[in-house]
Amino acid sequence: MSESGDVTWLCGLPNSVRRGRFQAPDRDAAALAYARLHRYDPISVEHVGDGWYDITGEGVEPGKPYLYRRVFRVNRAPDQSRRGVDENTARTALCALHGPGWAVREPYIVAEGRYGKSGRADLCVLPDGESSVGYEIKTDRDVLDRLPRQIPMYDHCFARRVLATTPRHLDASCQRLPAEWGIVLLDPDTHGVLDQVRPATPRDLDPASGTLLLSELWAAELHHLIRERNLPIRKRAPIGACLDLLQENFDEPALRDMALHTLNQRQGARVHAWRIGDP
């Protein structure tokens, strides 16, 4: 809630491009603001139940009002800042399940194929001497709607795939997830680990343990790596040329090491790497 007493409301049809956020003291005020923004010129906006609103407005002929039926819905917007805190707490708890290694926050991942979906993994763990683990985190503030499109992305990039979720989503997750996925149960309040419901079945495909993270590096970071190693490169060579040069001169373990140490040096960036499990 803002200092003025306003809160954020989501107004419009679910999944519609016309859905928007409005600051208002209550649901009715948000509904009226939405109706005015979309030029309904309403005479009245009436809450008809479960967040749905009807609008009484002017018809085509002056003086002849008509009634729109359940034109749009108004719901309280979720607190995304709190959701971020919850996920960070969960990341810390999940990293504690592993021995020495690396953890990476929100690396970019993509499904197999030319038209594969892309997105970001909540957490990648790279234990020393072991295959990668990709964690998708679903707290009580999340829904499972995106899970079906996330599964092929994780499957293509990680040797082991794990859903970390709360008791609220456990039954539905067991029905939706492939049997090879692991499940970790999180406390809905503290987001610590309550139980490891089932282990993940590893697979041979493991880009995350290879050069996947190299594509996260910025042009300036790649140029710095190249200069440090005295490799010839044009001053403003594009990212693709930098990646090609590094891959021609170094093997996968060396490239992964470069990527992890570079991501570890970042401050305040979305994608960041850090060591875990070291004494």
Image (tube, rainbow, N blue to C red):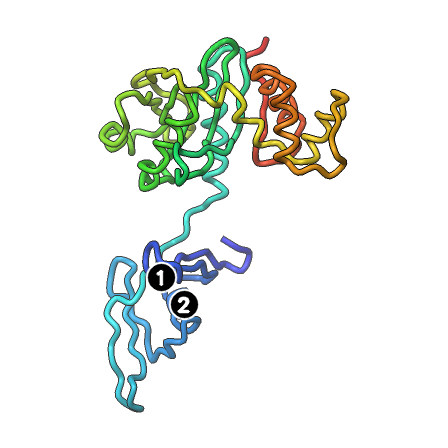
Residue at image x 52%, y 20%? 210
Residue at image x 49%, y 37%? 84
Relative horizontal placement of residue 256, taking residue 203 as reference (left or right): right
Residue at image x 29%, y 86%? 60
Label 1 residue SS:
strand
Q: Quadrant of residue 230?
A: top right
Q: CA distance from mark 1 to mark 2?
A: 8 Å
Residue that numbered label 2 is attached to: 34
Residue that numbered label 1 is attached to: 12
State yes or no: discs 1 and 2 in contact (Cβ < 8 Å): yes
Q: Amino acid at mark 1?
A: Gly
Q: Nearer the viewer, residue 152 or 169?
A: 152
Q: Quadrant of the C terminus?
A: top right
Residue at image x 41%, y 38%? 114
Q: Earlier in the sequence, mark 1 or mark 2?
A: 1
Q: Amino acid at mark 2?
A: Tyr
Rendered position, 28 above or below 140: below
- Residue 101, how many percent across, how many down? 54, 14
Q: Nearer the viewer, residue 245 or 20?
A: 245
